[in-house]
Each structure stands twice: as C-alpha cells, then as structure tokens.
Amino acid sequence: HGTMKINSKGHLEIGGCDTVTLAKKFGTPLYVIDEELLRQNCRAFYNGFKKDYPGNEVIYASKAFMTMAICKIIEEENLGLDVVSGGELYTALKAGFPAEKIYFHGNNKSKEELIMALENNIGRIIVDNWYELNMLNDLAKKMNKVPNIYIRVSPGVEAHTHQYVKTGQMDSKFGFPLFNGDAMRAIEYALTLENVNLVGLHSHIGSQIFDAESYKAEIEIMMNFLKLVKEFLGWEVGELDLGGGFGIAYVEEDDPQPIEQIAQEIMQAVKEYSVALNIKMPNIIVEPGRSIIGNAGTTLYTVGAIKDIPGVRKYVAVDGGMSDNIRTALYGAKYDAIVANKAKNIKSEKVSIAGKLCESGDMLIWDITLPKIEEGDILAVTCTGAYNYSMASNYNRLPRPAAVLVSNGQADIIVARETYEDLIRNDIIPERLTNEKR
Ligand code: LLP
C-alpha cells in the first residue's frame, strides 16, 4: 500500500527509500512514515467530509501519533487537531498549529491544562463532566474569556470492537450519559453559564470500526437527541462531533469500507434525519486518528536470536518489542510483516516474532508465514503508524526509536533516537546516597 514497493535489489522500498539502507543509516528499531500516504489519508477525509461541506471539520486525533513535524503536515492538509492533554496541546502550539483549529478532549483535564487552553484561545473545549464544566466557567470568568465548548454525550452505542477501545456504551468513564437525562441537564446548565459558549455536542463510539453501520446508529441516537434538545431547551445544535474510530486493514482479513464511502453515508444519514426530524442540519466534525496515520507507518527491526523449539514454535526475536509496539500484548492486535531484504523471496516457514523485553507476553506477531529468515535480516512490521510511537515506553530502559519521514527518495528524521543519556536525564541521586557522603 501507499508508496511501498519492491526495488530492483529485491528490497522493500517506502517513499522511494530502500528500507535496508534506512535501517543501516538510522539504526533499528526505526519508525518509517510514508508522507505521501499520510497526505492521501488526510485528503480522503477532507474530500469525504469537508470539500462539499465547508462548515464541517476533520480534526486529526493526535494521540495516534504526534510530533511537531506531523502537526505541520496536518496543518498543510487543512485539518484541525484533537488534543487530549497539556503535552499534546503544548506540542501543537510549539509547532505553530493555529490555535483556533485545536480541539481539547479528556475526561479529567486539570486546572493547569484548562488555563493553558484558555490563555491560547483554542478552538473548542469538549467538556466531559460537571466538575470540568464548573471549573472551566470559573476559570474563564477570572481570565475574562468565553471559550467555545461542546458537551460530550455518552450515547449508549457499542461499536463491535475490542472491550478496551469502545467508549460509547452506557458504562463508560467518558461524557454525560444520555439515558438518565444527565446530558440534557448539562446542556441546560451550560446554556445558563456566562463564561462558556456552548456551540455543539460530541460523541464517540469506539475504535477500529469498519463500516458506516455503527456511525448510523450513533447518528440516529444523536439526531433524535438534537430534536429533543430543540424541543425542551429551544436550542438548535450547530455542530455535531461524531468522534473518530475509522478502521484500517492491519492484516489481509481486515476489510474496512473506503473513507469517502463512509463519509458519504454519514453525511447522507445526517441530511435525512435533519429533514425527517425537522431540525437544522448541524455541521459535522470527525476525529480520525488511526485511519490518518496507521497504514503510513512501518517499523524496521533487525532480527537477532532465532529459537526453534521443534514441534512447538519458532521464535524470531527482534531488537524492539512491546516498548515500541504494545498493541499485540495489550489488545491481541494483529500485524503483518515483510522481510525487507528478502521481499521477493517465497514465504516458506511459519514463525512468531518476539520482542527483546523481559516478559513472555512481549510478542509482536504470533504465527506468520515469512521467507526463510536469518540473524541480521531486516524485518518490516507494517501499519504501525498509530498508537505505536505514541504508546511507546522505556520499559527495560530501552531508548525509544527514531522516526523518519520518507518521501520521493528523501528521508528526514522527525524524532531523534533516544540515547542512554536521555534515559538518565531525570534521574536524581539524593546527596545522602552519594559515595562522597558515605
Ligand atoms: N476521538 C476520541 C474522543 C477518542 O477517544 C479517540 C480514540 C479518537 C477520536 C480517535 O480514534 P481512532 O480514529 O484513532 O480510532 N490505543 C488504542 C486506541 C485507543 C483509542 C482511544 N480514543 C489502540 O491502539 O488501538
């Protein structure tokens, strides 16, 4: 997919760069980001949701993968940005991302984070709970601001996806529940507050959703709720944020509907409900993360120890693991891989790809058929753009990998590889433990 191909040497190439050369030049593990595919993904969303509906917004859920360079690309592609912490907000602002296109999420924003958002006049604050609503209004009053806000509604829809990534069900830590009237009361109350300007509602139903059906269920519930809000409170909702969650194909069996098609079905459903219910058609906001960056990322590893346990399993260990990709261990996620220096060779043996961290669950891929693999080979695990680097850790004190952006034969570092020095940067030895004192 994207700009991936096999070059004349039989090596995997991405963005016109030979991945074996990239591995040699920048070291491994290495995140490789296909700039062209990233931009194509942005454009699919732009064309699907925004081109014909200028009031709509597509905001990239930066939790999936955020660096300052990525912020630049997102800005160039005319998308907004969804941030969920002071750290993401800081990164966006430092990258010069336009504040009015930043949307701030989170179920437990701190006072400091809200102050930062207010000081910088960001576009929207998505209010999750009563505590936040009151705190925000009080802070805004003191700072003489009136931020634009959404109320986050927990719509009670369950997308058919992994337990830990579905967020719209009734029993959820996110948002004001719809079923018990809490969401309606929050809207009524927010409309009375002087230092917040309620402009829309938000809901999010989960992640890795393959077709429009789950979104249509969400739209049905939310549009009916918009109608109720209009009837009870006399307030017409201008902006409806449907959240993110658009799925991608990690492995061959995954078969997501193309984004343009989902977008068209979503916009059609919104149109139909607004006519049927006789309410103003709201502007639609979507928050894709994974579907923007997921398939644009590939991780290169160097193969080390290979352990064949006859009749049981052949383990192929690489020089990274759950510290740079925790998704297999955490969610049982599935990935595909290519032996980058033997991309043309016939797939002939079943192996499992292990990491180098000290626990049995540290696996990247269980059971994959690959060409005969040897120590020193370069393994490319595909579709690692989303929730890999952003969920990376220093477990076992492994320095986090570098990331390079590749395009037209050019490779630029966008995140430097961490060094051992970085690992001890924040360590402090209290004076009473130093040898001189002993
Ligand atoms: N909007 C909201 C309110 C969200 O909670 C999320 C994801 C998104 C947008 C973006 O969802 P996406 O389009 O990327 O699916 N770490 C997990 C995914 C957790 C997603 C959390 N919220 C994973 O690695 O699969």
Image (spheres, grey):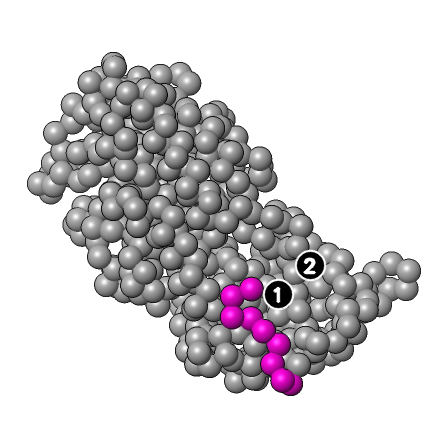
Q: Answer whether residue 437 is magenta in the image.
A: no
In the displayed structure image, the side of residue 326 where residue 10 appears, left or right: right
Return the residue nearer the eye: 87 or 332: 332
Confirm or reject: label 1 Cβ below 8 Å from ligand 1.
Answer: no
Percent position (x, y) of residue 193? 16, 27
- The numbered dot on residue 179 is none
The reply to whether residue 436 is visible in this rendering is no
Q: Which amino acid type is shown beneath numbered disc 1?
A: Val
Horizontally, is 153 left or right of 213 in the view? left
Query: Residues under labels 1 and 2: Cα distance?
Result: 9 Å
Residue 175's place in the image compared with 257, above or below, is above
Check residue 365 in the rendering and tell me which mark sits there, or answer none.
2
- Image quadrant assignment for residue 264: top left
Q: Residues within 10 Å of mark 2 (few under 14, many from 20)?
A: many
Q: Residue at x 56, y 81 (%)?
A: 18
* Residue designated by label 1: 381
Q: Which residues are magenta?
A: 1-9
Q: Residue furthest right?
A: 311
Mark 1: which secondary structure? strand
Marks 1 and 2, the one that precedes in the sequence: 2
Q: Are marks 1 and 2 in contact (CB under 8 Å)?
A: yes
Question: To which quarter of the image does residue 173 belong?
Answer: top left
Q: Main secondary structure of the magenta part?
A: loop
Q: Residues within 10 Å of mark 1 (few under 14, many from 20)?
A: many
Quick check: is the Cβ at mark 2 less than 8 Å away from ligand 1? Answer: no
- Spot occupied by residue 77 in the image (x, y as percentages of width and height): 32, 60
Magenta stretch encompasses residue 3: yes
Residue name at image x 43 percent, y 68 percent = 36
Tell which of 20 and 316 is nearer to you: 20
In this view, 9 is above or below 91 = below
What type is the residue that disc 2 sits on? Ile
Rendering coords of residue 140 (x, y %) = 15, 39
